[in-house]
Amino acid sequence: MGRIVLSTNMTLDGIGQDPTGEEGAPSGGWFDMTDADREAWAGVFVAEAMETDAILLGARSYEWFAARWVGREGAWAERLESRPKYVVRSGDGRSDWGPTKVLTGDVVEAVTDLKREVDGHIALYASYQLVRTLVDHDLLDEVRLMVFPHVSGSGGRVFGDLIAGKPARLTEVQRVGDALIQLRYELAHS
């Protein structure tokens, strides 16, 4: 049985939207404010990629990641490229980032089936609309939050608009570089 693990970046106040500032959000661009920790940050995500068996993404997140990773070289890029990717999408879009399967129809049913099919770590990056659906339906197993030392004040939250709260158990706190912290939590299932 697969385990879906959300691994994402966020600010101190829980904002995940527009980390690079490319979307033009007023509070965007906070990712680049800690350049000194970029190598340590990358080390954490490379290590995670090496333990990942599959990747699950929403349509917009797939487009964003594919635009940055298709054609890149190196162990991290090659590992991500080779992992099977599952994209929740209702319309057309690219699917050229390594092995990619589009999940259509009922999202909850499709992801439940995916968890049965994939044995191991299913990485979920960004995809906050999908995150809400997975949390609301007890399909998200673990959360890894890379916390950036910035308060945005506004913007899209990683866990915004949930139907109900969800208990979680802290499993690890890791200092990353001089300014970042990664928090890991197991989510309780109903």
Image (spheres, helix red, strand yellow):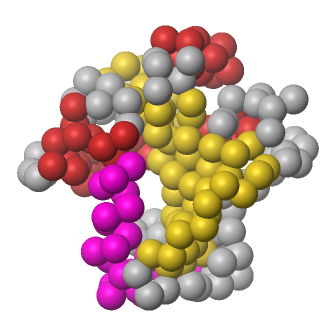
Task: Please name whichever residue, 118 or 60, is drawn nearer the observer in this view of the structure.
Answer: 118
Q: Position of residue 156 (x, y in %)?
A: 65, 63
Task: Please name whichever residue, 10 or 96, is drawn nearer the observer in this view of the structure.
Answer: 10
Q: Residue at x 77, y 52 (%)?
A: 169
Q: Classify residue 151 as left or right of residue 187.
A: left
User: Magenta part of the protein: which range?
Assistant: 26-48
Q: Residue at x 15, y 49 (%)?
A: 75
Q: Position of residue 68 (x, y in %)?
A: 25, 54
> On the image, which quarter does residue 32 sit in?
bottom left
Q: Quadrant of the C terminus?
A: top right
Q: Residue at x 57, y 34 (%)?
A: 4
Is 150 above or below relative to 174?
Answer: below
Is 181 above or below relative to 43?
Answer: below
Q: Position of residue 6 (x, y in %)?
A: 56, 46
Q: Classify residue 51 as left or right of residue 128.
A: left
Q: Residue at x 49, y 86 (%)?
A: 179
Is 27 magenta? The answer is: yes
